[in-house]
Amino acid sequence: STDSVESCLDCLLKALAHNNPRSVPRGNFTLKLNCYSCLCFVSPPEFMRSPCVEAGLIPPLVQLLHSKDHEVLLQTGRALGNICYDNEGRSAVDLAGGAQIVAGHIKSLSQNTDPDNGKLLTVFCGMLMNYSNDNDSLQAQLINMGVIPTLVKLLGLHSDNTALTEMCLIAFGNLAELESSKEQFASTNIAEELVRLFQRQAEHEKKEMIFEVLAPLAENDVIKLQLVEAGLVECLLDVVVHTVDGVREEDVAQLKTASDLMVLLLLGDESMQKLFEGGKGSVFQRVLSWVPSHNHQLQLAGALAIANFARNDGNCIHMVESGIVQKLLELLDRHVDEGNVTVQHAALSALRNLAIPVVNKAKMLSAGVSDTVLKFLPSEMPPVQFKLLGTLRMLIDTQADAADQLGTNGKLVERLVEWCEAKDHAGVMGESNRLLSALIRHSKSKDVVKTVIQGAGVKHLVVMATSEHMIMQNEALVALGLIAGLDLVGAEKDFVGAGLVQVLHKLLSDEMSAPEVKYNSMVIICAVMDSSSLDLFFSHPPPEPLHKEVQGLAFIDVVSKLRSHENKTVSHQASLTEQRLTAQS
């Protein structure tokens, strides 16, 4: 019963508090030790922990950590470790300064490889692990105490002690989640120790434990490079070879973890470049061989690795020359039907990055990249839609023929207009607007403009001109200027319906608008006002509604102010625009 527990605890407390723990008299030693054995036995259940704390057991218990007696330290460490299982216990240990004393013991004992010491170190590490588990502020406290370098040293000196090694790994896993720990880890030889430990493991569980520490540590760029230099990549490639055909659950898990970690190492610029080795590196070649694999996880990791290698122009140009595009296209072709979304997304990411250097665009277009990418137009998965749009936009940049061909593809334009309304997916919405604009800007083709007008795309470009991103405003305005110049009659109704003139007035009046935005807005005004000459060539009457809107909003006042704009291009365009407006008024 609770009463008997409390009376038992009361006895314990009296016994523990009876003497100064720093100098335990021989006569009371056995009693104290029995108390501790009893305490270690009773403290794990939850209902016992609170009474221990409330009875004031923690301060005298922490004082016993000053004892010179090995057995007393062992039992005290166990008792405190059990009590630290919940927050109330932790707070009491924190208040009594228990963690600092234990950290000090670990530091002074770490050099001693005596087996008995190993047991005590394991108990103390376990106590600190329970103390800081899932508690950011207590983890930060341990980091500030300098626990990390001590534990790394322990791992090196006591690598034969399985229990202690596991305790260190769990502690690392806890602490490595905190950003502030990464710097301390980076100043130790943790990378070498973990790789050395990994190489010695045969059991799946042990490898998994090390992986759980490696993953958070490898998020740090300095540690990424240290891990690469310590030989982790070779270990990972080895795991892949041994598990790729495995059907056991643990093989599948190890393959995933190892290949994911490989991709993570490639996210650091230095570690990635070191492994690329000018495209001649054996690691690069082996990762490349993952792409045609029959295993989805390896296909995914291979495509993501290529996307990570393709983070600078030199690498991209080399990879396109070495025929990687064909491998990615074959992979995508397999997934039109197999439909693995993560593989589709990864392969499209790689193609998008490879398409950035100008010299790669024509080569990739002639390899049939746009045709393969278009096969995924029916996709309903936003991540795939986003990368598909980005890849096409990169490919047509400066490529007029390709922009013309894609811009007159009614199905593509129809899908873009649909995605321009994807309010739940801002990324997809932004990319479809940008591609719509790019098709017009890079083709400068009347046929493309006509396709966009017929597909009801004009209103989206007008909305895009009000974007908070200057680059998107500008792209929209240049496209709208081309529409006004190439087919104003066809676009007039959409311009009026979308409130183009009001948008331009607002952009010109806003002091925060960038010079390019002001310049391009005036170019559109001029194109609209020039339309009075259209009736000489066409049977259509000039677009009166637009003229009336321009005159009704007194553009001449706004434009005349811009004649003194500090940007010469803007002030010159303002003079021209004012002349046009005056001539039409």
Image (cartoon, helix red, strand yellow):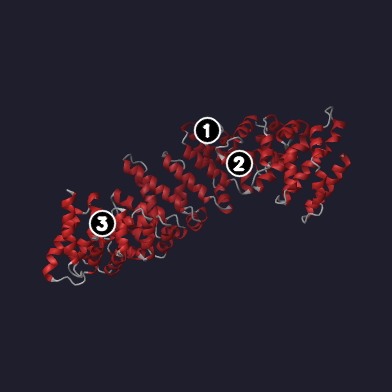
Q: Can you identify the residue that label 3 sits on?
A: 54
**Residue under the image location 54 percent in, 50 percent down:** 310
Query: Where is residue 474 shown, x and y percent of the image?
Result: 69, 46
Query: What amino acid is at disc 1?
Result: Glu
- Is 428 positioned to the left or the right of 541 in the image? left
Q: Characterize the local packing of mark 2: few (<14), some (14-19) or many (20 or more) Cα atoms within 10 angstroms.
A: many
> For residue 14, which quarter of the picture?
bottom left
> For residue 404, which quarter of the picture?
top right
Q: Earlier in the sequence, mark 3 or mark 2?
A: 3
**Residue under the image location 64 percent in, 46 percent down:** 468
Query: What amino acid is at disc 2?
Result: Gly
Give the camera-side residue of 390 and 16.
16
Give the camera-side residue of 17 and 542.
17
**Residue under the image location 50 percent in, 38 percent down:** 344
- Is 451 positioned to the left or the right of 583 in the image? left
Query: Where is residue 163 shown, x and y percent of the image?
Result: 25, 57
Secondary structure at badge 1 equals loop
Q: Are marks 2 and 1 in contact (CB under 8 Å)?
A: no
Q: Can you identify the residue that label 2 sits on?
A: 430
Q: Is residue 4 above or below residue 439?
A: below
Secondary structure at badge 2 equals helix
Query: Where is residue 351 shown, x and y percent of the image?
Result: 55, 43
Q: Can you identify the residue that label 1 sits on?
A: 380
